[in-house]
Amino acid sequence: MTATFFAIQALNGLQFGLILFLIAAGLTLVFGVMDFINLAHGVQYMVGAYLVAAFSAWTGSFGWGLLLALPTALAFGLLLEVLIFRHLYDRSHLDQVLATFGVILFLNQAVKFVWGAAPLSVPVPEILSGSVEIMDGLLYPVYRIAIIAAGLLVAALLYVLVSHTRVGMLVRAGATNAAMVSALGVNIRRLFMIVFGFGAMLAGFAGAMVAPILSVQPGMGDNILILAFVVIVIGGIGSIRGAFLAALLIGLVDTLGRSFAPNLLRLVLDPSAASQTGRAIAPMLIYIFMAAVLFFRPSGLFPAKR
Amino acid sequence: MTELTHIRSASVPSAAARIDLLPVLIFALFAAAPFLAPASGAEGYVLSLLTRVMIFGIAAMSLDLILGYGALVSFGHAAFFGIGAYSVGILASHGIEDALIQVPVALAASALFAAVTGAISLRTKGVYFIMITLAFAQMLYFLASSLAAYGGDDGLTLPSRSLVAGLSLLKNDFGLYGVTLACLLGVYILLRSVVNSRFGRVLRGTKENVTRMEAIGFQPFSFQLMAYVISGMIAGLAGCLLANQAEFVSPAFMTWQRSGELIFMVVLGGLGSLHGAIIGAAAYLLMEEFLPEILHAAGFFLNDEFRWRLTENWQMVFGPLLILTVLFARGGITGLLRRGHHG
C-alpha cells in the first residue's frame, strides 16, 4: 500500500517537475541570453491554458485546440516582446521587474474581462481518459502519463536543439557571453526573439497540457512563476541542464513533501502535532531547499560559465 | 566641460533647497487633513484612506533605505508587514493587547528574521538576491497560510485595536491617525539621520562600488546587513499599524504581489529620497482607490454593461499605467519635480 502510494506520488512529482521544466526552460534562456527578468512569463502559461480552453470549446476537440493554441501562444509572446519587452533590455533589473509586474496585472485582469472570473474546465480528451494499471494495484490516469511523456519528449527535443544545432550553439554561447556573440556578428536581438517566442510557446504548451487537470483561472500563472524562478535559480541561470534537474528535484520535493512530511514527523511527534507541523512545513520545503542550495552555491548548481 | 559642470552644480543648491520644502509640505498636509476631513462629508473614509497611505509610506521608506541607498532589491519586503501584523494578531488573540508589548515583540521578530535571512541573502548578488529574498517571504507566506490556530488562509480578526499603556488611544480613527502620523514623522527623521550619518554614507558607497568600499577598509557586508535589519524593523512597525488599521491580519499581507507594490511605490516616488517614498505610496494608493471611479466617469459613452466591466477590471488600465511609468518617468515623481525646477 505505502509502496503504491509512494509510486503514485513520485509520478505526480515527476509530472509536476516536467511542467515546471517547460516553463523554466524559456525563462532561464531569456534570462541567460538577454539578462532580462521576465515576471510575465507565468502569464504566458495562463494564456496557453486559456487559449486551449477557448479553442477546444470552439473546435470541440482538445487536439485541434492544442494545435491552434501553440502558434497563437507563440504569436502572443512575440507581440509582447515587440510591444514592451524590447524596450527594457537596457534597463536595470529593477525596471524590468516593475514593468513585467505591470504586464501581469494587466493580463490577469484581461482574461477576467474576456472570460470572466469563474474557473473554466477543459475536458480530458476522449482517447486519453481513464486509467491504466502500471504495476500491481497501481492505477494511474492515462492523461497524466501523457503529460509525463510529452514533457520528456519536449525536454529531449530541446536538448537536441540546444546542443546539436547552430541556433542552439548560438543560444548557449549567448547565455554564456552575450557581448562576445554579438561582437562576432550575430544579431543577438533576433536570436533573442527566437528564444523568447520559443520560450513563450513552451510555457503556453505547459499551460495547455495541464488545463484538463487543473481549473483554468486568472492568476494561475503567478505562483507557478515563482516556482519556475526557484527552479532556474537553483539550476544556475542560463543552464538548460540545470533547469531540468532542478525542476525534477523541486517537483519531487514539493509533491513528496506534501504527502510524506506529516508521516515522517509522526516518528518524532505525536500524531496531531505531526500532521499540523507537517502541513505547515511542506509548502516551505522548496524554499528552504533553495536557500540551502544558494547558501552553499551562491550561483546555483550548474552556473553558466562566465 | 568643467565649466559646464560648475554652472550646473552652482544651480543645484537653490533647487535642493526648494526640494527640501517638499517633506515639510507633506507633513503639513497630513497634519492638516484631520481638520479638513469633516468638510468632505466622508470623514471616516478620508481618515482611514490617509492612515493607509501613511502606513504604506512608512513601509516604502524602509524599503527605500536598502533599495534606494543600498541598491539591494528586496523582493520580499512584505514579509515584514506580515511579521508585524501577526505579532499584533497572535498576541492579541492570547489576550496581550498592549502595543507596549506588541510593538517590541514585532520589532524583535522582524530584526531576527532580517538578520538571519539577510545574512544568507547578502551572500548572493543581483538576481539571486532578488529571488532569495522572495523565497524567504514566500516561506513566511506559506507558514502563515498553514497556521490553522490563527486563521490559516482566512486570516484572523483582531478582538480589538491595541491599547497604548492601557489606554484605548487607537480605538477611534482620530487616535490611530495621530499615532500613525507620529510614527511616520519619527521614522522619517530617524531614516534621514541614518542616511546622512557616516553609516549612511558608507551604505551609499556600497551602492556605487562595493569593491572600492572594501579597498578603503570597510566591510560592505556588515553595513548592508545592518541596513537590512533596520529596514526590516521599520517595515515590521508598519505591519503593526496595518493590523490595527484593518483590525484584521491575513497571509494576504505578505503575498509577493504586495512586495512588488512596495517596490513600485519606492520607484514611483523616486529612488533614494525618503519623502519620495511617501509620495510614491500616496500616488499608488490613491490611484488604486480612485481609478475605478475615474474609469467609470470616463466611460460615459460606453454601454452600461461594458462600462461596468471596465470599472470592475480597473487593473487592466492600472497595469499599462505602471509599465508606462517605468518606461518614461525615470527618476519617479520627485525626479520629475526636480527636472521641473531646472526648467
Image: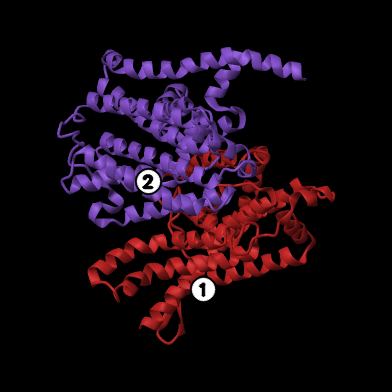
Chain colours: A red, B purple
The image shows residue B52 at horizontal and vertical percentages of 34, 30
User: As rendered, which of A144 and B47 lies closer to the eye?
Assistant: B47
The image shows residue A94 at horizontal and vertical percentages of 57, 40
Q: Amino acid at mark 2?
A: Ala
The image shows residue B57 at horizontal and vertical percentages of 40, 30
Q: Which mark is residue B111?
A: 2
Q: Amino acid at mark 1?
A: Ile
Q: CA distance from mark 2 to mark 1?
A: 47 Å
Report the quarter where the C terminus of chain A lies.
bottom right
User: As rendered, which of A5 and B200 lies closer to the eye?
Assistant: B200
Secondary element under disc 2, as helix, strand or loop, is helix
Instruction: From this view, report whether residue A53 is shown above or below residue B181.
Output: below
Which quarter of the picture shows residue B2? top right
The image shows residue B327 at horizontal and vertical percentages of 61, 32
Report whether residue B5 is seen.
yes
Secondary element under disc 1, as helix, strand or loop, is helix
Residue placed under numbered mark 1 in the picture = A145
- Residue at image position (48%, 26%) is B276
Q: Of discs 2 and 1, which sits in the foreground? A: 2
Q: How many marks?
A: 2
Disc 2: which chain?
B
User: As rendered, which of B40 and A154 lies closer to the eye?
Assistant: B40
Relative side of A149 to B239, left or right: right
Which quarter of the picture shows residue A22? bottom right
- Residue at image position (41%, 48%) is B114
Relative side of A120 to A30, left or right: left
- Residue at image position (66%, 48%) is A35
Report whether residue B249 is seen.
no
Local packing at callout 1 (Cα closer than 10 Å; few below 14, some 14-19, many 20+) is some
**Residue sticking out furthest to the right:** A185
- Residue at image position (47%, 40%) is B227
